[in-house]
Image (tube, coloured by chain):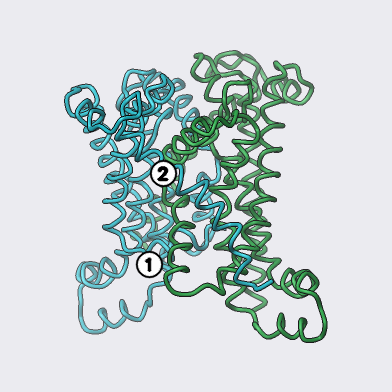
Amino acid sequence: MIKKMLAQAYIWLLLIILYAPIIIIAIFSFTNSKVLGNWTGFSTDLYVNLFTGGVNNSLIRAIQSTLFIAVVAATISTFLGTVAAIGITKWHGTKKKIITFLNDIPMLNPDIITGISLFILFVAVGLSQGYTTVILSHIAFCTPYVVLSVMPRLTQMNPNIYEAALDLGATPWQAFRKVLIPELKGGMVSGWILSLTLSIDDFAVTLFTKGNEGLETLSTYIYADARKGGLTPELRALMTIIFVTVLVLLIIINIRANKAAKKN
Amino acid sequence: MRRSNWAIPYFIFLLLFVLLPLVMVAIYAFQDNSGAFTFDQFVKFANEPESINTFTYSLEIAMITTVLCLLLGYPAAWILSNKELNKSSVAIILFILPMWINMLIRTLATVALFDFARLPLGEGALIFGMVYNFLPFMIYPIYNTMQKMDHSYVEAAQDLGATPLQVFRKVTLPLSMPGVGSGVLMVFMPTISTFAISELLTMNKVKLFGTTIQENINNGLWNYGSCLALIMLVIIGVSQMFVSQDDLDSDEKGGLI
């Protein structure tokens, strides 16, 4: 009994320390003082400003760029990775080892190395840096995760149904659309969601590949803002929204996973 | 078209955007400004006390962070995976949650906490911030391994008269080592390569190796920057060799979503 109480106390103490910073930010997102820690009365100004553009427009633009890059990169990665996974399952021996190794590199490489190496490539070939280079870089580190989410579905599925479709006169494209895609949908969806979060979350790779034509994503915007000294107060509201969204999403995913587990 | 050909576009993409950039970093590291082959960059690194100091200091900070995360995280993972001590799944979700929030936001939250508590920013804030950022990455793989562990081994040891300490030392600890391995790697790798975070947590007072690399690249010293990046890559490669690939496959990639 005492052992259990001690164990629970340890867990919750650790959680309180982990969450203290986030909770402080959330509390002070409801007051409009410039400096954090200075309570000047309850107000929802920061949230209102965030949505009505009362803040300088650059924050809104950064949020839009972040979402645009994430959706484009995740979608291309999902397509590229799914098609690749279908092919890779047919590769064997050394060839397969090489492509699996190459596929592992972006996942094991630290962000800063990925960022610098792509920066050097883009500079060397003279590609002007902006949306294109950022999206290409995001595809490079997202696609491996798509490949890994789709591959297990391919090895689990019955290989004969694709052949059966071909025998019954389907073109490869039809067989792909009508047979493979429905079987792989689950893996593709989790690959897409994972890519989306990785892309939104990325800071280091974007910083090195965004160029200096004024393109900012949320991370690089926050970085530039924090380096200037004071943090734009509206960011406290934004952080709180991001935190609550992630919390709600994780709870939903967990409830769904529990339900699915119970059904089985 | 044969299905094996479907992987070719991605294979070419990998060659162009994963392999080629790394090869270029390696080539740049052995060149001078005019493109001639040289070891000068490495000589420069060895002879510049500031670079060497930053490098060893970063190693030190990364090791301290990793050890602290292990000391704090191992008991937490053990309690969370123990059905007698913890029944709810709420706590584990709360531990995983920060992994999904942007690293910069979490860092700035730490800065906010230190400001709020009127504590000075500096080395203490840096280590606190790093542990705060990376603790979930230690807990999660260890928790995963412990959960998959066959509980009958523990029961067998107890039936055979082992004391709780003996059960832990001879059964639980060895069986959880794969999780510890990937946890250590998942904390050590990002801490050794971190940049930006240290600037924000120490008001630019402390510089880490990642920041040095970034500064050199930003200042147009690509050859020297590449040399430093290559040195970091070697460190990471060596630390990865200590953890077998199988552990990574099962813990790092699987089950994050």
Q: Chain of mark 2?
A: B
Q: Do discs 1 and 2 share a chain?
A: yes
Where residue B3 appears, x then y in whole percent? Answer: 64, 72
Q: Which of the two residues, A176 or A55, is positioned nearer the viewer here?
A: A176
Which chain is rendered green in the image?
A: A
Where residue B57 appears, x then y in whole percent? Answer: 23, 31
Quarter holding the N terminus of chain B? Answer: bottom right
The residue at which mark 2 appears reads as: B22
Q: Colour of chain B?
A: cyan
Label 2: which secondary element: helix
Contact between labelled residues 2 and 1, with CB atoms less than 8 Å apart: no
Give, as a three-letter code, the residue at label 1: Asp
Q: Earlier in the sequence, mark 1 or mark 2?
A: 2
Q: Residue at x 64, y 82 (%)?
A: A159
Image position of A129 (left or right of B254): right
Q: Which of the two residues, A218 or A76, is positioned nearer the viewer here?
A: A76
The residue at which mark 1 appears reads as: B246
Q: Which of the two residues, A214 or B227, is positioned nearer the viewer here?
A: B227
